[in-house]
Amino acid sequence: MADPARARRLAVRIREVVASTLERGVKDPRLGMVTVTDVRVTPDLVDATVFYTVYGDEDARRTSAQALESARGLLRSQVGRATGIKNTPTLTFVHDRLPDDAQHLEDLISVARERDARLAEVRRDAQPAGDDDPYRRPRVIDDDADADGSDEPDSDEPDSDEADRGEAGLGAADPAGAGLADRDGSRRGEADDLDGTDGTVRGPAWRMYSASPGQGSGAVGGQ
């Protein structure tokens, strides 16, 4: 196995010799505009692969490949004479598709850029069919309003309507005026025989106790 540095130097020299011979030494009319792109030599310096490209269509590539196969012996002889090595490597010609693939990729990128430019031009004056933002967003509660709590009533404090209804219910406990029921449900009163100053005897008097505000205690007597 040869030194890798020697193999690289030999590959560079073979590329130069083959390119110059194709330009000046080969008179085959089938040979088109051939460019040698790279040469790779095996570590044992026995085989050399020559990569090339052809300017033109598929027919130009086919005829150029035939011309290179016909000039193989001539090219190898020129390589052996120029390098001076004992065993001249055999030459294998391979069409290099890397430049073609790169050019195809560039063409695709250009097409994509043109489409993006046309789409941007259409979007510039376009108007949305519906709302600008058709998605429903969650309602955001202000932190100050949430901390204040003024919007929500306090459940521990009774409102004024309930208080009024409670007072009205207590005042209407005894609509006939006969007496009010105490908390334990019993009727409270005092029966007294009151003698009038005129000598008449009045009936029993019941002292009433009202639970309604503004209603004082008083005696109601019967004749």
Image: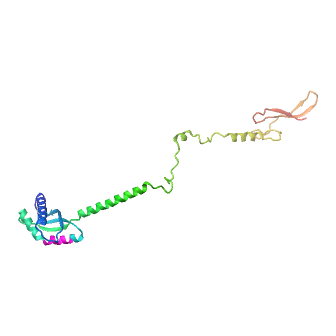
189 relative to 118 in the view: left or right: right
Q: Colour scheme used in the picture?
A: rainbow
Q: Out of 134 and 25, give the one closest to the viewer.
A: 25
Residue 74 placement: quadrant: bottom left
Q: What range is drawn magenta here?
A: 61-70
Q: Quadrant of the C terminus?
A: top right
Q: Residue at x 26, y 63 (%)?
A: 101
Predominant SS of the magenta segment: helix
Q: Residue at x 93, y 30 (%)?
A: 200
Q: Relative to 43, does residue 138 appear above or below in the rendering?
A: above
32 relative to 144 in the view: left or right: left
Q: Does residue 50 appear anywhere in the picture?
A: yes
View extreme (top): residue: 197
Measuring from the top left, give residue 97's x and y in whole percent: 23, 65
Q: Residue at x 53, y 39 (%)?
A: 144
Residue 198 placement: quadrant: top right
Q: Out of 93 and 188, give the one closest to the viewer.
A: 93
Q: Residue at x 7, y 63 (%)?
A: 82
